[in-house]
Structure formats: C-alpha cells, structure tokens
Amino acid sequence: KSNRWESAFALGEALCKQDIVKGCTYAGTAAIASGKAKVGFDYLSKSCDGFEPFACQTLADLAKKNGENKMRYMYQKRACYVGLSQSCKNLDKPRSLYSARGEEFYKTVLIDCELTHSTACKSHLASLARCSEPLTKEDCFLMPGDLSIIFRAKLIQDVAKLMLLNILAAQKLQKEDKNKNRYSYDLAEIMKNHKMLASYRYVFGFQVACTKKYEGRKADSTSMAVFKSSYQDLSNQTKQNIISFFKKDKGNECIDPKVGFEAFAVAKLDPLNPNKLDIWKINRDGNIISVSSGLP
C-alpha cells in the first residue's frame, strides 16, 4: 500500500521459496511495479501454475494490455476455474483458440487422458512439452492452461472417491458390530472418528429419505449438515443444487441397511455451468460408479 516495492518483493520471494504460492504473486506484482517485467512474469507464472487465482488474473490483465487476446482469455479462464468468481464474468473465447491440427491434438489428449497415468496420455504430454509438429508455438503455450483445469478437476475427483472409500470402511465396522449388525444412514454416526477438514469441495452422504426412513429425523444425511463450517466457501446456489440431489429419492427406493447401502459424493467442478454436478456413488461391495460427470 505504501509502494515499498523492494520490501514487498523480498517478503514475497521469501514466502515463494517456502512454496507459499501467494508469496510468488506478491513477488511478481512487486517486480512488475518496479519495472522488472520478465522477473514479475516468471513469479506470477509459477504462482498461477500453483493454482493461485489472483496471479492468473494479473497475467490476464498484462496480456490484455499487450493486445494478446488468446493469452488474456486463457489466464482469465484459469483464474475463474481455480476460484476467482469475478474472473468468470466477460470470459469471451476467441473463435479459434488453437490451430486446426492443434484442436485435433487437444481432443485426442482428452480421450487418451481419461486415465491421466496411461502410457498414451504421458506420450501426448511429452509431445506437447517438446512442442513438436503439427503443434504451433501458440498451441504449446495455450494448451497446458486448458489441460491444467481438466487435470486439477480429476485430482479433486480422486478426493471424492477417497471419501467414499472412507465411508465404506466405516460402514463395514458398523455392520461387523454385534450390537448393530447393520449398515447405517446416519452420517454423523458413520463419520464420528473422521477428522474434519477445513474445507470440502464435495458433499458426501446418503439420500435424505433413506436417513429419515431408517434412522429418524434427528440423524444427519450429509457432510454439509455434519461439518457445516467446512462448506462456507460454497455459493448458496451450489448448496441448493446439491441439496436438491440428496432429496430427489423417495423412501421406497432405499436399500434396507440390513442388506446394503448407497453413499454419494456431489460437487460442482465447472463454475461456468452452475447446474452441472459431478456425482459419484459407492455401494456395500465397494463399487465406485460415476452417476454424472461434471468435469469442465
């Protein structure tokens, strides 16, 4: 605030070296304000690659000043998808973001990288890193931004699957308990030994009708009810859409907890499509099933 850019850069650089990405944003902003454009760009790029949205938006603003419309769009899109809601406004995609061959390559990557650790996926990414033909230099600079959004979403999906596996493990203990000898639709009971995280992207739990039918009205169906403070960052619209999903089934569609159960994990991964939900479910056999894909 006092324009002491040398001090700001020193503090930002120290934080950045400790892998605190906001520090890289501070260092980059201070460097640019001091007239060190290349140094500033490098720090902001590192921060944006670390999913720090303000760095991505700052790079978008710089690209706009330089008349680089495709770069402006890509950096602003990245800022939008990693959490800066105001960056989602006025996001106009250029008519042709990639070259014709680049567009074909991108579509192939999305198909072959359905499993990100596959040999075909790794081969495509290596080709992108080398920037070999038929890709243009512009393709090679823009495409990693798009892919970072997709791959980040897939990593978030992995967290959802892990939460469902935690529910399965807790359900098995519940069923093996001689005093209970059944599964449960009370998430608070199932997750009583779970350490609450500061924030969750997915809401996980059971259909409300199943909880009411088998556990009573005082029992909790979803993690949004059990861990309320961990969902403060979710918009009201997103919460309403997710709650609507957990209220869609009727009691006669529920599996008797003496026999089995179904648990769900639901989130919004695409800020440009607020009604599009990513939904997964798990059953007593441990089968994790994609109910609805909400990938960007």
Image: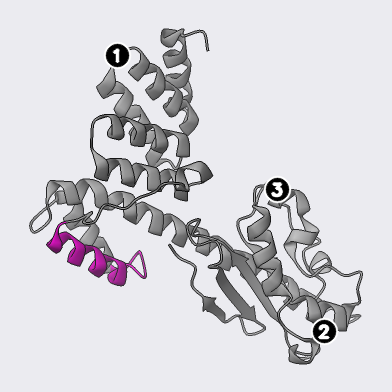
Q: What residue would you read off at disc 3?
A: 232
- Taking the spot 79% from the left edge, 81% from the top edge, the residue there is 210
Residue 8, how many percent across, how many down? 46, 14
Question: Looking at the image, is mark 3 or mark 2 earlier in the sequence?
Answer: 2
Amino acid marked by disc 3: Gln
> Can you say whether 86 is above or below 153 in the image?
above
- Taking the spot 54% from the left edge, 80% from the top edge, the residue there is 289
- Taking the spot 78% from the left edge, 75% from the top edge, the residue there is 208
Q: CA distance from mark 3 to mark 1?
A: 39 Å
Query: Which element type, helix, strand or loop, lies under badge 1?
Result: loop
* Figure colour scheme: one colour
- Residue 7 visible? The answer is yes
In magenta segment, residue 109: yes
Q: Nearer the viewer, mark 2 or mark 1?
A: 1
Q: What residue would you read off at disc 2?
A: 182
> Can you say whether 180 is above or below 35 in the image?
below
Query: Which element type, helix, strand or loop, lies under badge 3?
Result: loop
Residue 162, how many percent across, how many down? 58, 65
245 or 49, which is in the foreground? Answer: 245
Question: Looking at the image, is mark 2 or mark 1 earlier in the sequence?
Answer: 1
Residue 254 as seen in the image, left or right of residue 95: right
Q: What residue would you read off at disc 1?
A: 35
Amino acid marked by disc 1: Gly
Magenta-highlighted residues: 99-118
